Amino acid sequence: MPATDVVVIGGGCTGSSTAFWLASRYRQRVTLLEQRTVGGGPTGRSSGIVRMHYSYDPLIRLALRSRDIFAHFDGVVGGSADFKRTGFLLLAPPGEKAMVVANVRLQQRLGVATSVLDRDAIAGLDPRLRTDDVGAGVYEPDSGYADGYATATAFAAAARRHGAEVQEATAALRVLVDGNRVTGVETPAGRIAAGAVLVASGPWTRGLLAPLGVGLPIRTTRHQVVLLETPPQVAPLKSVLVDLGTGIYVRPDVGGQFLIGSIEEGPDEEVSPDAFNEGTDFDFVERVSRRLVHRVPAFSGVAVKGGYASLYDVTPDWQPILGAVPDTAGLFVAAGFSGHGFKLSPALGEALAGLVVEGRSGAVDLVMFRVSRFAEGALIHSHYAHGIVG
């Protein structure tokens, strides 16, 4: 039975990032298992927004460190995450202005370059934006977007350069436990002995841990993204936009195209991670397009160029489950990211690697994301109406 120090299950952005930090910083023998191809799951279909606007200290710290890694990816990791610095603009309705101001103050104290904008300042960024129903804006000049597939594959390639073994097309069939300690993972090719196992397999995490008596309140939901194109005479948006009032996000893309999706929490369509409609629905396209035109009337002539659907692994509080699994030494979990894990993944992999090897996650305290918080009634309530905003 081949042996390794740590098995990481899941070749998405979080799993591949953690494998990289384990191998590069801690010189661990690492085996990364991916049932399909690295970056080929939800990570590869992420909208890839990189922003630091969160309500809680640990999330802000993770997002800030991650943005710095994205901005210097080749030097820190090697390769490219295809990060584009576009700026990030959040628009909030009047009822959420006070919360926006409080969150920005916290972010500024932690080192984020961000500011609150009034309507005149918002118009200065883009005069086409309708602001009569906006209470405040937030602008982060250093934020933007990156590519999920490029990020995951670059992390995996870097992990391999540091000695990690990356096994694609290799499913984790079962996490092996002896008494109260993890002993490895069973795969179709046999068993891999390991002193630690991190399960970071997104929507498949719940099923892998359930046979061990670990019940994770994770739902798998379908999330749609639409690709639109502005008419030739209309300039596209320059910044990533999150609009709390209309419940949409917009992300620039190449050639005047852009992605648009929803930040609303329901009603969610729960699906099987192995069989779901990967296309878009007409009513969804119509709904988000109408809301976009409300915010940017100049976009009334946008053309639909395509779209797709991917998966969110959603927890009751829309925040991830991170850390050691109680009563099973050596077993760790990172899942339930509810659609906003990509932007955290570079720094989160760093923190998780420290937790696995040293029992501590460095400068970022992950305890609020512990597995037991649901049983304890210690859910993390977003300060915003949309939990995905954080």
Image: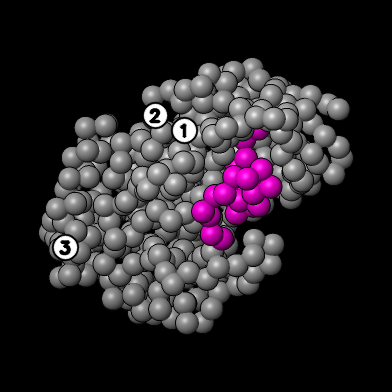
Q: Nearer the viewer, mark 3 or mark 1?
A: 3
Image point 34% across, 72% down: which residue?
292
Q: Amino acid at mark 2?
A: Val
Residue count near mark 1 (Cα–Cα under 10 Å), binned few <14, some 14–19, many ≥20: many
Which of marks 1 and 3 precedes in the sequence? 3
Give the crowd class for mark 3: few <14, some 14-19, many >=20 residues within 10 Å.
few
Q: Secondary structure at mark 3?
A: helix
Asked if residue 117 lies left or right of residue 250, the reply is left
Q: Is residue 93 visible?
A: yes
Q: Which is more N-terminal, label 1 or label 2?
A: 1
Q: Give the quadrant of the N terminus.
A: top right
- Give SS at disc 2: loop
* Highlighted magenta segment, given as a residue range: 197-220
Give yes or no for residue 204 being in the magenta stretch: yes
User: As drawn, is 131 to the left or to the right of 269?
Assistant: left
Left or right placement of residue 327 versus residue 315 in this view: right
Cβ atoms at labels 3 and 1 below 8 Å apart: no
Contact, mark 2 vs mark 1 (Cβ under 8 Å)? yes
Q: Secondary structure at mark 1?
A: helix
Relative to 220, is 138 above or below?
Answer: above
Q: Position of residue 329 (x, y in %)?
A: 61, 27
- Pointer 2 or 3: first along the chain: 3
Q: Which residue is mark 1?
A: 347
Residue 50 position, x and y percent, is 42, 46
Q: Which residue is mark 3?
A: 95
What distance separates the C-alpha of mark 3 from that of mark 1? Answer: 32 Å
